[in-house]
Image (cartoon, helix red, strand yellow):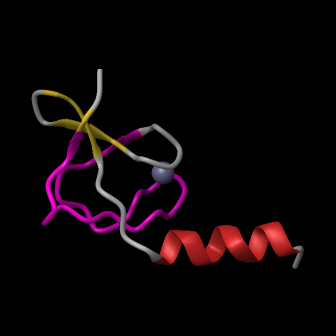
Amino acid sequence: MKMWELTDAINRQKAKNPVYLKGLIYTCPECRRVVVYEKGYCPHCGQKLDWKGGAKHEV
Ligand SMILES: [Zn+2]
C-alpha cells in the first residue's frame, strides 16, 4: 500500500458532512456523487458521512 492510499483510507474513517444539493438530494463531500439521505457511508467511495452536524450548503 502506498502512502497516499493509506492517508486516503484514514481520511475516510473520519465522518464528513454531506453536501446539500436540493430537495432531499445530498452529495458526498469526497467523490461528489449523490448519496442517500441519512445513509452512514457513501455507497460510491465509502466516505463516512456525518448527518448530525447537518449538511454543508454549497452553490
Ligand atoms: Zn463518495
User: Most prominent secondary structure in the magenta stretch?
Assistant: loop
* 44 inside magenta stretch: yes
In this rendering, is residue 25 above or below 17? above
Q: Quadrant of residue 43?
A: bottom left
Q: Position of residue 19 (x, y in %)?
A: 30, 41
Kindly give the residue lying farthest to the right in the view shown: 2
Q: Quadrant of the C terminus?
A: top left
Give the residue drawn at x 29%, y 29%: 58
User: Is 22 displayed left or right of 12 in the figure?
Assistant: left
Q: How many marks?
A: 0
Give the residue drawn at x 41%, y 57%: 42
User: Is 54 displayed left or right of 39 in the figure?
Assistant: left
Q: Position of residue 25 (x, y in %)?
A: 21, 34
Pick the front one: 33 or 12 = 12
* 35 inside magenta stretch: yes
Q: Quadrant of the N terminus?
A: bottom right
Q: Position of residue 36 (x, y in %)?
A: 25, 49
User: Is 11 displayed left or right of 52 in the figure?
Assistant: right
Give the residue drawn at x 40%, y 46%: 28
Give the residue drawn at x 30%, y 50%: 18
In the image, the segment drawn in magenta is: 34-56
In this rendering, is residue 38 above or below 34? below
Q: Position of residue 49 (x, y in %)?
A: 32, 63
